[in-house]
Image: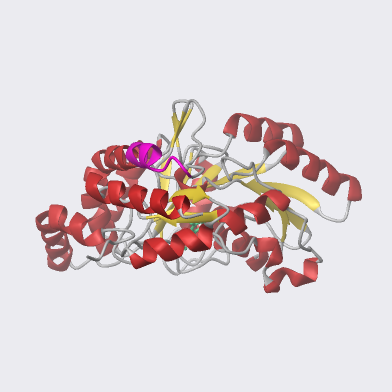
Amino acid sequence: MNIPFIDLKTQYTHIQEAVGARIQAVLAHGQYIMGPEIDELETELARFAGVKHAISCSSGTDALLLPLMAIGIGPGDAVFTTPFTFFATAEVISLLGATPVFVDIHPRTFNIDPEKLRDTVKRVKREGKLKAKAVIPVDLFGLPADYDAIEAIGQEEDLFILEDTAQGLGGVYKGRPAGSFGQAAATSFFPAKPLGAYGDAGATFTDDDALAEIMRSLRIHGQGIDKYNNTRIGLNARMDTIQAAILLCKLAIFPQELKARQKAADLYEVALSGLETPFVPKGYKSSWAQYSVLSDHRELLQEALGKAGIPTAVYYVKSLHLQSVYAGFGYKEGDFPVSEHASQRIFSLPMHPYLDEAIIAKIGACVTETLNTL
Ligand SMILES: *Cc1c(COP(=O)(O)O)cnc(C)c1O
């Protein structure tokens, strides 16, 4: 028996006809770049995230890059973020010549710790070497970051907040949807994300009209009023029309899928009594991009699960401050103990909307059995 970590094949059986029809429509009208499906998707996405503007683009990475470029982030600027995330979160900061300044995470939510953020921003301002410009909180594994606290710090310290909700779309924080926090938010439609395309794609969200206009220009080579009028240096960062067509089919079933993910998480919670299961604070809803647990016996459990045909993965093996590319910053082991401790003990189990109860029970039994041998 081969249990998938993420089951896109089963999902496809549910949307096959709709996807086929939508792709055929694109092939028939032939507007492969910026076709009508792009507008349609942007309208639906903005509604879903509860914001004025959704700007589709080529990846989650470009969705992060566009707002940072739009506000002119560059050399000498400090952008605060977590070391416990996918590399792209910090990469976009470095790509613009700015400096990522890491802030440790909360031990249970794995998201940026607001108290430590405040302390770090104050320290950077005191030192005076870098200009404190922006913060990128990440909605890790689908759980929104603590936005009441982060938005308060953003106001106090005059920071631009860019929500990295690449994993978080579909999550909720105190009644507000993921994608609606800060001045802008970025999401990814990489196939394995909760809302995935059949290739690379992403979107940026904002309520700010002026910012939206600049990002729309940056997405197409910094274009002005027409194709051959360039007003700034930009990117080729458009989403393909075909991906928008596919995403429209997937978005239609996304609310149901989020419920199914929540049900799987609830079943896991009961089945995995011997592990530290995910913590979802009151008033939060996760999109369950990953179901990540903590154990001092990770290797043993991964091996036992693997033998039983159950795939697992480790997000993230190495905190970003310890990546060789950032060696020049002089960070060392022990600088972000919460993040480092998590990376030593964390692993993720299969999670998707088509995970059935019997498989979760099997995973639970395998974990219990393995822990009983200790
Ligand atoms: C996936 C991911 C990204 C990058 O998205 P791509 O679409 O792969 O470029 C950025 N940040 C986080 C937290 C992610 O998980």
The answer to whether one can see residue 289 in this image is no
Residue 287 location in percent, x, y? 39, 42
Residue 171 location in percent, x, y? 42, 38
Instruction: Tell me where residue 44 sits by quadrant.
Output: top left
Side of 143 relative to 332 (left or right): left
What is the quadrant of the N terminus in the image? bottom left
Image point (47%, 43%), residue name: 274
Residue 158 location in percent, x, y? 73, 38
Instruction: Tell me, yes or no, whether the highlighted magenta stretch contains residue 113.
Output: no
Residue 305 location in percent, x, y? 38, 61
Image point (33%, 61%), residue name: 310
Q: Vertical placement of 85 versus 152: above or below?
A: below
**Which residue lies most toward the bottom here?**
324
- Nearer to us in this view, 49 or 297: 297
- Nearer to us in this view, 70 or 256: 256
Task: Give the residues drawn in magenta, as a range.
Answer: 265-274
